[in-house]
Image (tube, helix red, strand yellow):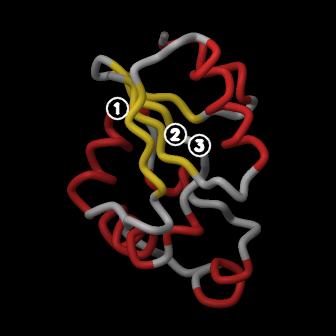
Amino acid sequence: MTTIYHNPRCSKSRQCLAILEEKNEDLNIIKYLDNPLTEAKLSEIIDLLGIKPIDLVRKNEAIWKQEFKGKSLTDNELIRIMCEHPKLIERPIVTKNNKAIIGRPPERVIDIL
Protein backbone atom coordinates (compact mmCIF):
# COMPACT_ATOMS: atom_id res chain seq x y z
CA MET A 1 0.00 0.00 0.00
CA THR A 2 1.22 3.46 -0.92
CA THR A 3 0.23 6.35 1.32
CA ILE A 4 0.19 9.96 0.18
CA TYR A 5 -0.10 12.78 2.69
CA HIS A 6 -2.03 15.05 0.39
CA ASN A 7 -3.19 18.65 0.19
CA PRO A 8 -5.70 18.90 -2.69
CA ARG A 9 -5.13 22.66 -2.92
CA CYS A 10 -1.42 22.16 -3.73
CA SER A 11 -0.57 21.69 -7.41
CA LYS A 12 2.53 19.60 -6.63
CA SER A 13 0.47 17.33 -4.41
CA ARG A 14 -2.18 16.93 -7.11
CA GLN A 15 0.51 16.15 -9.71
CA CYS A 16 2.09 13.56 -7.44
CA LEU A 17 -1.29 11.93 -6.82
CA ALA A 18 -1.91 11.81 -10.59
CA ILE A 19 1.40 9.98 -11.11
CA LEU A 20 0.49 7.44 -8.43
CA GLU A 21 -2.93 6.90 -9.99
CA GLU A 22 -1.36 6.47 -13.46
CA LYS A 23 0.88 3.76 -11.98
CA ASN A 24 -2.21 2.01 -10.57
CA GLU A 25 -0.88 2.17 -7.02
CA ASP A 26 -3.07 0.84 -4.21
CA LEU A 27 -3.51 4.21 -2.49
CA ASN A 28 -4.24 5.42 0.99
CA ILE A 29 -4.86 9.17 0.62
CA ILE A 30 -4.54 11.15 3.83
CA LYS A 31 -5.67 14.75 3.68
CA TYR A 32 -3.43 15.81 6.54
CA LEU A 33 -4.95 19.29 6.83
CA ASP A 34 -8.33 17.70 7.60
CA ASN A 35 -6.86 14.83 9.66
CA PRO A 36 -3.73 16.18 11.37
CA LEU A 37 -0.91 13.77 12.06
CA THR A 38 -0.01 12.72 15.58
CA GLU A 39 3.42 13.59 16.86
CA ALA A 40 4.31 9.88 16.84
CA LYS A 41 3.24 9.45 13.20
CA LEU A 42 5.05 12.58 12.06
CA SER A 43 8.20 11.41 13.89
CA GLU A 44 7.93 8.06 12.12
CA ILE A 45 7.62 9.77 8.72
CA ILE A 46 10.59 12.03 9.44
CA ASP A 47 12.65 8.94 10.35
CA LEU A 48 11.62 7.25 7.08
CA LEU A 49 12.58 10.39 5.16
CA GLY A 50 15.98 10.40 6.88
CA ILE A 51 15.84 14.13 7.54
CA LYS A 52 15.72 16.50 10.49
CA PRO A 53 12.33 17.95 11.45
CA ILE A 54 13.44 21.44 10.40
CA ASP A 55 13.93 20.10 6.85
CA LEU A 56 10.21 19.30 6.63
CA VAL A 57 9.08 22.80 7.63
CA ARG A 58 7.64 25.10 4.96
CA LYS A 59 9.60 28.18 5.99
CA ASN A 60 7.79 30.57 3.66
CA GLU A 61 4.42 30.09 5.37
CA ALA A 62 3.19 33.20 7.17
CA ILE A 63 2.66 31.34 10.46
CA TRP A 64 6.32 30.26 10.45
CA LYS A 65 7.62 33.75 9.70
CA GLN A 66 5.37 35.40 12.27
CA GLU A 67 5.67 32.99 15.17
CA PHE A 68 8.68 30.69 14.86
CA LYS A 69 11.37 32.03 12.51
CA GLY A 70 14.64 32.71 14.27
CA LYS A 71 13.69 30.82 17.43
CA SER A 72 15.85 28.02 18.75
CA LEU A 73 13.53 25.01 18.70
CA THR A 74 14.22 21.38 19.57
CA ASP A 75 13.27 18.57 17.20
CA ASN A 76 10.37 17.63 19.49
CA GLU A 77 9.15 21.23 19.55
CA LEU A 78 9.29 21.39 15.75
CA ILE A 79 7.28 18.18 15.45
CA ARG A 80 4.68 19.50 17.91
CA ILE A 81 4.46 22.80 15.99
CA MET A 82 3.97 21.01 12.66
CA CYS A 83 1.22 18.86 14.18
CA GLU A 84 -0.49 21.96 15.58
CA HIS A 85 -0.04 23.84 12.28
CA PRO A 86 -0.12 21.19 9.51
CA LYS A 87 0.21 23.87 6.81
CA LEU A 88 3.87 23.97 7.87
CA ILE A 89 4.51 20.40 6.68
CA GLU A 90 6.21 20.14 3.30
CA ARG A 91 4.08 18.28 0.79
CA PRO A 92 3.32 15.87 -0.64
CA ILE A 93 4.87 13.04 1.34
CA VAL A 94 4.57 9.52 -0.04
CA THR A 95 5.37 6.36 1.91
CA LYS A 96 5.65 2.76 0.74
CA ASN A 97 7.41 -0.32 2.14
CA ASN A 98 9.11 1.55 4.99
CA LYS A 99 10.42 4.22 2.61
CA ALA A 100 9.31 7.82 2.24
CA ILE A 101 9.88 10.66 -0.16
CA ILE A 102 8.83 14.28 -0.50
CA GLY A 103 7.22 14.60 -3.92
CA ARG A 104 9.03 17.73 -5.06
CA PRO A 105 9.29 17.61 -7.93
CA PRO A 106 6.33 15.22 -8.24
CA GLU A 107 8.29 12.84 -10.48
CA ARG A 108 10.49 11.92 -7.49
CA VAL A 109 7.68 9.66 -6.28
CA ILE A 110 8.66 7.13 -8.94
CA ASP A 111 11.86 6.47 -6.95
CA ILE A 112 9.99 4.52 -4.25
CA LEU A 113 7.50 2.66 -6.43
Number of the front mark, 2 or 1: 2
Identify the disc placed on residue 5.
none
Q: Is residue 26 above or below residue 89?
A: above
Q: Which residue is mark 3?
A: 92
Q: Residues within 10 Å of mark 1 (few under 14, many from 20)?
A: some
Q: Residue at x 57, y 59 (%)?
A: 57
Question: Disc 3 vs disc 1: which is toward the camera?
Answer: 3
Q: Secondary structure at mark 2?
A: strand
Q: Marks 1 and 3: in contact by CB < 8 Å? A: no
Q: Is residue 113 left or right of residue 36?
A: right
Residue 76, quarter of picture: bottom left
Q: Residue furthest bottom?
A: 66
Q: Residues within 10 Å of mark 3 (few under 14, many from 20)?
A: many
Question: In the figure, 87 relative to 43: above or below?
Answer: below
Residue 75 sits in which quadrant?
Answer: bottom left
Are the residues flagged by discs 2 and 1 in contact, CB closer than 8 Å? no
In this view, which residue lies farthest toward the left? Answer: 40
Residue 37 falls left or right of residue 31: left
Q: Residue sitting at 69 percent across and 65 percent down? A: 59
How busy is the neighbourhood of tag 2: few (under 14 within 10 Å), some, or many (20 plus)? many
Q: Amino acid at mark 2?
A: Ile
Q: Are marks 3 and 2 in contact (CB under 8 Å)?
A: yes
In the picture, the disc for residue 93 is 2
Which residue is tagged 1?
48
